[in-house]
Image (cartoon, rainbow, N blue to C red):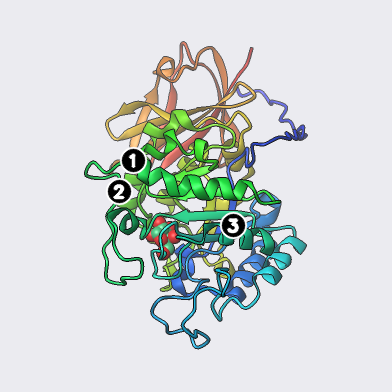
């Protein structure tokens, strides 16, 4: 019989001061997966309002990040564009959809939120807007002046700088510097430059590198003052995208620690679409697996959906405090796969209180039904309470040296548990 265990309803709040920032993974929203280039200040404000109204803010979600397309685009189509991307001193101009960046950041701060922005070390962003190349100092100063709290710095056209292509050739196809034996130092340099400029600003600005994992970014991201870095290519709302990204995370795991996160890209639950809104094509079980793995990976959690169109299922996925607590755990480790049985992969993350989060992730097309006994492989032993994190319920108390745990995991689904040792 399962004994009733006292669940702690109080938590100690630990405040750590010092040079290192973003000690726990960033949680918030980003405009890209939802609005793509159709983003505007009005839509961003409405996302902030919806984040508050839906109650997401009470579960730790607090960054509102503007992705590409707040700057002028080289297509020159913006009605207010008069041939200049920057003022006479090199300070960047915002396009007509973002008339007042400082006002927008104030709006976020007055509502208990933070604001993020996006740029590229190259002359152009991936969407063809003005990047920071040659104007890094002015850009870092603008972000600080506006009150920006987070920068996503995206490789995009920087390969062209390395290749010596003309800065403003709109037809260039920039190379990926690290691939094909490029000089890795050349690819580190632009991130180093912006990292040191951000550090010189009179406010903390969380720095996210977006260069898709080139040159093993997890090995040097910390040295360029970044707090997180994308490890893989852009996510889409398909099972193969989520699966391939998930399977590529373990190599970077040893480099995760408080203030340093591997970023497998943003969440693709809810209404997404990069400007063409539709319900995520991930099935419900796939969404549980996606959220569980991003939780156990200690990944930055950035919602990518239209927050004004949140349905109950998506809201529940995003507001499970026990699933979020594993992601935010202060020990800061990244869960890794310790065992593979067919297409079942078992991820384990050590937590600060000595317990372990375990995600039994079924990547296969058949459901998995078994009595699981290999606890030694997971470095789990003795008597344990098994808590189902999604259901927020203790489901078993077993002596893992002697007894098995029955698993019944749907195709592309997950069982996300916490093992608490009963000493
Ligand atoms: C790249 C990034 C995306 C997004 C777009 C914007 O593709 O990986 O996350 O920022 O650029 O153009």
Q: Tell me which residue sits at (71%, 52%) in the image.
A: 58
Numbered mark located on residue 177 in the image: 2
- Residue 103: x and y in percent read 71, 71
- Residue 106: x and y in percent read 73, 66
Mark 2 or 3 closer to N-term? 3
Numbered disc total: 3
Q: Is residue 16 visible?
A: yes
Answer yes or no: do the residues labelled 2 and 1 have beta carbons within 8 Å?
yes
The Cα–Cα distance between marks 2 and 3, rounded to whole angstroms, is 24 Å
Numbered mark located on residue 184 in the image: 1
Numbered mark located on residue 140 in the image: 3
> Label 1 neighbourhood size at 10 Å, few (<14), some (14-19), many (20+)?
some
Q: Which of 369 and 297 is in front in this view?
A: 297
Q: Nearer the viewer, residue 219 or 14?
A: 219
Mark 2 or 1 closer to N-term? 2
Q: Is residue 225 above or below residue 113?
A: above
Q: Is residue 30 left or right of residue 272?
A: right
- Residue 119: x and y in percent read 49, 61
Q: Is residue 378 above or below residue 192?
A: above
Q: Tell me which residue sits at (55%, 55%) in the image.
A: 151
SS for callout 2: loop
SS for callout 1: helix
> Label 3 neighbourhood size at 10 Å, few (<14), some (14-19), many (20+)?
many
Q: Which of 296 and 316 is in front in this view?
A: 296
The Cα–Cα distance between marks 3 and 1, rounded to whole angstroms, is 24 Å
The Cα–Cα distance between marks 2 and 1, rounded to whole angstroms, is 7 Å
The quarter in which the C terminus is drawn is top right
SS for callout 3: helix
Q: Tell me which residue sits at (62%, 25%) in the image.
A: 352
């Amino acid at each position: 019989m399962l004994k009733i265990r006292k669940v702690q309803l109080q938590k100690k709040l630990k405040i750590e001061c010092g040079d290192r920032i973003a000690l726990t993974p960033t949680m918030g929203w980003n405009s890209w997966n939802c609005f793509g280039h159709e983003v505007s200040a009005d839509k961003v404000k409405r996302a902030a309002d919806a984040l508050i109204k839906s109650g997401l803010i009470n579960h730790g979600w607090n960054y509102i990040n503007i992705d590409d397309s707040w700057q002028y685009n080289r297509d020159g189509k913006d009605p207010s564009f008069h041939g200049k991307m920057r003022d006479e001193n090199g300070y960047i101009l915002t396009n007509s959809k973002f008339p007042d960046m400082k006002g927008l950041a104030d709006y976020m701060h007055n509502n208990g939120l933070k604001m993020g922005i996006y740029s590229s070390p190259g002359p152009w962003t991936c969407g063809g807007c003005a990047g920071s190349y040659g104007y890094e100092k002015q850009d870092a100063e603008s972000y600080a002046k506006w009150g920006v709290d987070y920068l996503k710095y995206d490789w995009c056209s920087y390969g062209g700088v390395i290749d010596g292509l003309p800065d403003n050739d709109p037809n260039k196809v920039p190379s990926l510097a690290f691939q094909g034996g490029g000089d890795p130092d050349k690819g580190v340099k632009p991130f180093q430059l912006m990292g040191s400029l951000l550090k010189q600003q009179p406010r903390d600005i969380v720095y996210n590198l977006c260069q898709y994992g080139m040159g093993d970014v997890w090995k040097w991201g910390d040295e360029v003052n970044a707090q997180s870095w994308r490890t893989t290519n852009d996510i889409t709302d398909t099972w193969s995208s989520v699966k391939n990204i998930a399977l590529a995370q373990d190599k970077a795991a040893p480099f995760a620690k408080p203030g340093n996160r591997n970023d497998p890209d943003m969440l693709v639950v809810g209404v997404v679409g990069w400007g063409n809104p539709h319900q995520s094509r991930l099935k419900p079980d796939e969404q549980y697996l996606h959220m569980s793995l991003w939780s156990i990976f200690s990944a930055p959690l950035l919602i990518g959906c239209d927050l004004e169109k949140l349905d109950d299922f998506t809201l529940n996925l995003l507001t499970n405090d026990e699933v979020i607590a594993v992601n935010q755990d202060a020990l800061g480790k990244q869960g890794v796969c310790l065992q593979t049985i067919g297409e079942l992969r078992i991820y384990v993350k050590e937590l600060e209180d000595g317990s372990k989060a375990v995600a039994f992730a079924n990547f296969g097309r058949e459901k998995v039904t078994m009595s699981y006994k290999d606890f030694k492989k997971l470095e789990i032993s003795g008597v344990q309470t098994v808590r189902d994190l999604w259901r927020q319920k203790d489901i078993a108390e077993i002596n893992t040296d002697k007894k098995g745990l029955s698993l019944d995991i749907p195709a592309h689904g997950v069982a996300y548990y916490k093992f608490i040792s009963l000493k």
